[in-house]
Amino acid sequence: MCSWSTESGQDGLPQDKIKQESKLRLIDPGQALCELGLEEHQLRFTSTVYVEEDGPPTKTADKIYQLIKSKVSDTPAQYSSDGSITMSDSVLIKVSGDEESKSVLVSWSHQDEDLGSYLLQIPKTGLVT
């Protein structure tokens, strides 16, 4: 019989404890899920902010990208040709709309909660630079 629990390791990363036949082992969470025959589920948060900004959506996306680069220097941001911005392999910012009003979608995984919440504030507080 197997049982498991999660705790933070010395490096602050989650580690799963698996107890199997009276033996206790610390292993990577992905390995624990595999050994227990479970599937990993990813929790994502998504929020949309509506902004009044003149110009095409790509101009607004570029403005957001420049603000991110100036405010978040420790996490690299990638700007795609479609106007989307990605950070930390799990944060996505996508601007859509017309010449006057835009919607800015911000989506992030629970592991990047602090970063995603912070980035959501950029279009909420205004894009005036």
Image (cartoon, grey):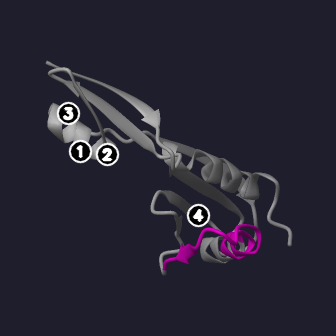
- Horizontally, is 128 left or right of 111 in the view? right
- Identified by mark 2, the residue type is Asp
Give the camera-side residue of 3 and 61: 3
The residue sitting at 28% across, 40% down in the picture is 40
SS assignment at label 1 = helix
User: Residues in magenta?
Assistant: 64-80
Q: Marks 4/1: CA distance?
A: 37 Å
Whether 70 is among the magenta residues is yes
How would you rate the neighbour count of disc 3 (Cα within 10 Å): few for under 14, some for 14-19, many for 20 or more? few
Q: Marks 1/2: CA distance?
A: 5 Å
SS assignment at label 4 = strand
Q: Marks 4/3: CA distance?
A: 36 Å
SS assignment at label 3 = loop
Q: Marks 4/2: CA distance?
A: 36 Å
- Identified by mark 3, the residue type is Leu
Name the residue carrying label 1.
31
Q: Are marks 4 and 1 in contact (CB under 8 Å)?
A: no
Name the residue carrying label 4.
95
Name the residue carrying label 2.
28
Name the residue carrying label 3.
38
- Identified by mark 1, the residue type is Gln
